[in-house]
Image (tube, rainbow, N blue to C red):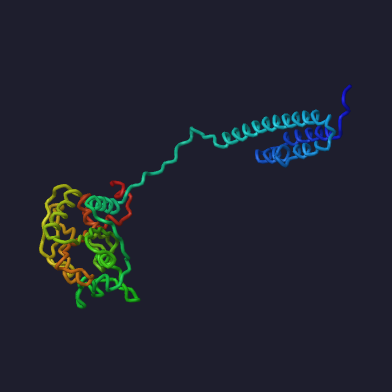
Amino acid sequence: MTPVPTSLEQELTTLQAAAIAAIAAADTLDALEKLRVDYLGKKGQVSKVLGAMGKLPPEDRPRIGSVVNTVKTALQTELDRRKDALQTAQINAQLQAETLDVTLPGVYRPQGRVHPINSIIDQITDIFVGLGYTVASGPEVESDYYNFEALNFLPDHPARDMQDTLYLPNGELMRTHTSNIQIHHMQDHDPPMRVLASGRCYRRDTVDATHAAVFHQIEFFAIDKGITFTDLRGTIRAFIDELFGEIPIRFRPSFFPFTEPSAEVDVEWQGRWLEVLGCGMIDPNVMQAMGYDPEVYTGFAAGLGVERLAMVQHEIDDIRRLYSSDLRFLRQF
């Protein structure tokens, strides 16, 4: 004799029909996942029916348990079938949206180039890092102390004149060299040190083929026991050879307030000599101002004109070309 269906069996049959209809109507994967949790999750509707089985007579429980498993299997099968259909539709829609017309012409994007100034700064930095130097930086807006006083510039030095230096209303100035970084670094560190610093500098120069009011400079300096001018000459010779190859250079006696003795270094360029850097042994007054004993420590410093080195490297005849933003010129590099 066939058992009479209980109200729980009828509830399961109704639940299955409603769930299958809802699954078939789900139009997104998120909606389908929500239905799965709603019907088959730990707190879902099928689990609630299972919770009511404890109230059934013992002889009805196996039959109802079998019905519950059948419902769960049917719902999971429908969920999987609908998930596959939705995923396939999603992939097809994506493929349709991303279809490319291979007959259309390509979009041309010109290849970027490193500017000659940035390029030579990177090359110089690599050379000195390879020699064991540390890279440092400092402010472009500077005080008189760091730009002049601590570097042994006398109060009446011509470089402090309004005609040479760009002063700001608050009494500060635009640094005229990267030597200010030397003072900042010496204040915060003890010898020995080997430091490279680069950045923009500003002077009230008349712009011509070899001068610019805004230019880039690289400063390198070393302080240790027993450093001599021979070490400076050897460092500059090694640097020039690495950057340009073995080209003629010459040292000319010169004067800088912060070095003694001092020299200017020229390289042969287009049949004539071009000054590219100034250098010398760090003046004992600078050492003492920073708290170093000049009887114990010595050092050298040099400042390089980046634009002029770029002119030598690329055989450029006019410094103004480097700032022209002329793509016909820049594409050569």
Q: Please say whether residue 278 is visible from this viewpoint.
A: no
Where residue 241 sits in the image (x, y, percent)? 16, 49
Q: Quadrant of residue 222?
A: bottom left
Q: Quadrant of residue 321?
A: bottom left
Q: Nearer the viewer, residue 230 or 238?
A: 230
Residue 218 left/right relative to 247: right
Height in image: 125 above or below 286? above
Height in image: 253 above or below 56? below
At x 68%, y 38%, the residue is 32
Residue at the front extreme?
58
Q: Quadrant of the N terminus?
A: top right
How many marks the image carries: the answer is 0
Q: Quadrant of residue 218?
A: bottom left
Where residue 92 sits in the image (x, y, percent)? 60, 32
At x 19%, y 62%, the residue is 223
Q: Nearer the viewer, residue 251 or 32?
A: 32
Residue 215 left/right relative to 29: left
Height in image: 59 above or below 115? above
Height in image: 240 above or below 185? above
Where residue 181 sits in the image (x, y, percent)? 27, 64
Q: Nearer the viewer, residue 20 or 214?
A: 20
Residue 53 left/right relative to 280: right
Residue at the top extreme?
1
Q: Nearer the viewer, residue 331 or 201?
A: 201
At x 28%, y 59%, the residue is 198
Q: Please say whether residue 95 is visible from this viewpoint.
A: yes
Where residue 59 sits in the image (x, y, percent)? 84, 29
At x 73%, y 33%, the residue is 24
Residue at the bottom extreme?
156
